[in-house]
Each structure stands twice: as C-alpha cells, then as structure tokens.
Image (cartoon, helix red, strand yellow):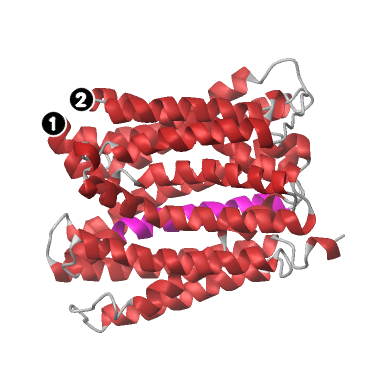
Amino acid sequence: MALAARIALLVLLTAELMDILDQSVVLTALPAIQESTGAGPAALQWLTTGYSLPVAIGLITGGRLGDLYGRRRLLLIGTVVFTTASLLCGLAAGPGVLIGARAFQGVGVALMIPQVLATLHVTFEGQNRSKAFGLYGAVLSVANVLGPVMGGLLTEADLFGLSWRPIFLVNVLVGLAVILLGRKFIPESTEKMADRPDLTGMALSALAIVLIIFPLTEGHLHHWPMWCFGLLAAGLLTLGVFLRHQQRKQNNAPLVPLSLFQGRQFPGGMAAQLMHGLLCGLFFMTWALYLQRGLGMSPFHAALAFVLLSLGELAGATIAAKSAGRFARRLPQTGALITIAAMAGYGLQIAAGRADLTLLGMTAPVVLIGFGLGMVSGPLADMSLAKVPHDNAGAASGLFNTAMHLGIALGTALTALVFFATTDGSPDAALNRGAFLTVLWWVASLLALMWALMFCLPKRPSSQTG
C-alpha cells in the first residue's frame, strides 16, 4: 500500500473514530455537565438523543449525496460542520446551547460517516481492501468502549480548569487535521446519475426514521404511552410510502437503489449489522450499571472493565485485519461463537452468586467477549458491501450505518423490558445482578441470530467466488 493511500486510510479511520467516541464520551461527563450548566434530567438525556437522532435521520441522505456530489467533498463538509459544532459544545454556557450544538454535531456526522465506508469500498482493492476494512473494524471496536473512559479521564483531569469541556474541544484539533490531510490525500469519487437528488425520498426517509426511532428512544422513560405506538405505526406507514416512491424512482437516481437488495449478501449483512447494533445497545448500558450497582465498583474500576473488553476487541480486530479476507464468513461467524461462549461463561460466574466478583476474576470472559466482537465488525462490513456497485457505494454505506443506529435504538428500548422492569431503578445489588444475568441470555440469543444471518455472506474468499 503506497504512502499516500496509507495516509488517506488514516484520515478516514480518524473521521470514524471521532464519530464513535463522541457518541459515548459524554456519558461519564454528565454529572460534571449537570453541575456546571444546571441541566435537568431531561436535558441530560437530550445530550445523547440530540446527537444520535440527526445521525440516524441523515445517514442515508448523506451517503447518497456523496454518490452524487463527491464523497471526499461531503466528508470534508461534514468534518467542518462537526468541528465547528464541537467548538460550540466546548464554549456552551447553558444546556440549551449545548444540546443545540450536539444536534449540529450529529448533522456533521450524518454527512461525514457514510463517506468513510463508501471511500474504502471504491478506493481499495484485493488484499488492501480487506486490510482496510479490518482496521475499520478495529477502530469501531475500540472506540465503542474507550469513549466513556476518555470522557472520565479528561473530565477528572480538569485541564486548564475547563472541567468537561476538553472532551469536545479536542475534536477541534483532530477535525482540522482531517480537513487538511483529507483534502490532500483522499481521492475524490463521484457517480453523478441525476441532475438533482431525490428530495422527496430524503424527506420521507427522514420522517420514517424519526417516527420509528424517537418513540423507541423515549418510550421506556414515559412507561410506553399510547402515543409511542401511534408514532411507530405512523413510521411504518411512512416507510411503506417511501418504498413505493423508491420503486417509481428506480430509473432516476433514487435515494435507495432497490437493486441493492437483489440477492442475499447485502440484505443479509445489513440484517446482521442490525443485530450487532441491537446487542450493543442492550449490553453496554446494562453492563455499566451491573458493574457499579451489582458489584459496587467505583466509576474508575468500571472504566477499567471497559478497557479490558477494549483490549480484547483490539486483539480480535487485529486478527481480522491480518487475515485479509482469507476466511470469508467463517471469521466473523467464529467471532460470534467465541462471544456466545464467553457470555455463557460470564453468566455462569454471575449465576454462581459471585457478589464479590472482582475485575481480575472476570478478566477471562470479558476479554474473550471483546475478542469475539472484534472479529466481527470489519469483515461484516467488508463482505456486506463487497458486491455493491461503486455508483451505489454511498447509499449502501448509509443504509449499513443506519442499520447499526436503528439496532442501538432498539437495544436501548429493550433494556426497559429486560433490565429496568426487574430493577425499577433500584440500587439493590442482587436485583441488578439478576437483571444483568437475564440480559446476557438475551445478548447470547441475538449473537446466535447474527451468526445465522451471516450465512448470507460468501463462504469462500472473493478471489474464489464467482
């Protein structure tokens, strides 16, 4: 791989890293944010929802705009928006400005992130392509669990007396580097198939996603009132109207080319990605609560548990990157099976009544859980997008990323049924341990379903498939 290509890959992965970290970096800083801004409970929740909702709404549109007007151009525009919004977050004096700036960050991410997978797909080939997707999986895996750790460390360090603000201000320097290096080293790729984008399709898709994700995100906080189910029904109806509109637009650059769903490789991979997001949304929040409420760990020791899982993910993703696609679907399927076995082992530890379970005692299953998950992300993205035509790379990338975000929203909603229905917010250690044990069996079942869906992926390396 040439030096320029290596730098381009580094810039693309850094852009992805900024997005994933900013989804979770705010979590461990919430108490400090509340104290300094006077934010109430609802405002604190909107610091995360206000970021994730614009991302989910705009990913499909952002991906298609990249296809039409240039993937590098949209990546750089999105990075400018994200960097500016991060500066506003760091300077915000009150919760209203901070929530607005977080939403502005989400808009930037929706433009920026679909271009990462799409550019990897159209820029790299053969062994280099599989290695690039393997590294993408490594970044995705590590960033998912390092966000809370980084947020806690930066807030506790209180750099220059700025308390929580450096968790956002650090993005300014990183974003500027992505803009400058991306403009020089990332090759432009454009597939202009129409004079203008599908504005009606964009509006319908955005409306459908809002109507589906908003009640899933808010429902458990309001004990699932009827308006939640009304919005979900309206969202499904809008989705049907959107699909009908896309059928009529197939010969004029639709927002979602329905040809992507011919065959089983892309739809199967997208469904597996949905399961991946669902289990992540269910597992990580409840695990953090189990560590602190069920085992009485301090936030610092709970963060160390996330570091252990992160190290396992890094090891698994490194193996996936070095395999360079040689094992096709067997690699991510093996990762799913390892994770299931590790979840079962962890569950047996908890079921044995280990109220005094230490960080050292849980090291083996936690590292193995991370190791298995690390073997999934990169190869799953690589093989799901492998047969996507270059002119639809952005649309496919947007859909693939949207599946992850929708899965996380579904997983978060599922916590109300699987975890909070048992604990009811109680700090009782035994209740939290029992509820988390139930979560583990749910997560293991989702992993088994994801493993089954990956049979839609190629069983031989691409060089052997016809």
- Badge number at residue 369: none
Q: Residue at x 18, y 78 (%)?
A: 355
In the rendered image, residue 232, in percent from the top left (x then y), is placed at 42, 36
- Amino acid under disc 1: Gly
Apparent side of residue 53 relative to residue 245 in the rendered image (left or right) = left
Q: Residue at x 58, y 24 (%)?
A: 202
Q: Residues within 10 Å of mark 1 (few under 14, many from 20)?
A: some
Q: Which residue is the extreme one toward the right?
A: 466
Label 1 element class: loop
Q: Which residues are magenta?
A: 264-286
Instruction: Please state the total of marks drawn on the protein image.
Output: 2
In magenta stretch: residue 276: yes
Q: Give the residue number, with chain letter if any, for mark 2.
A: 94
Name the chief secondary structure element in magenta. Answer: helix
In the rendered image, residue 211, in percent from the top left (x then y), is placed at 43, 31
- Amino acid under disc 2: Gly
Apparent side of residue 312 relative to residue 131 in the rendered image (left or right) = left
Tell me which corner region of the image, top left, top right, bottom left or bottom right, holds residue 308: bottom left
Label 2 element class: loop
Label 1 vs 2, first from the N-terminus: 1
Q: Are marks 1 and 2 in contact (CB under 8 Å)?
A: yes
- Mark 1–mark 2 distance (CA, rounded to whole Å): 7 Å
Tell me which corner region of the image, top left, top right, bottom left or bottom right, holds residue 382: bottom right
Q: Is residue 69 visible?
A: yes
In the rendered image, residue 384, in percent from the top left (x then y), is placed at 67, 53
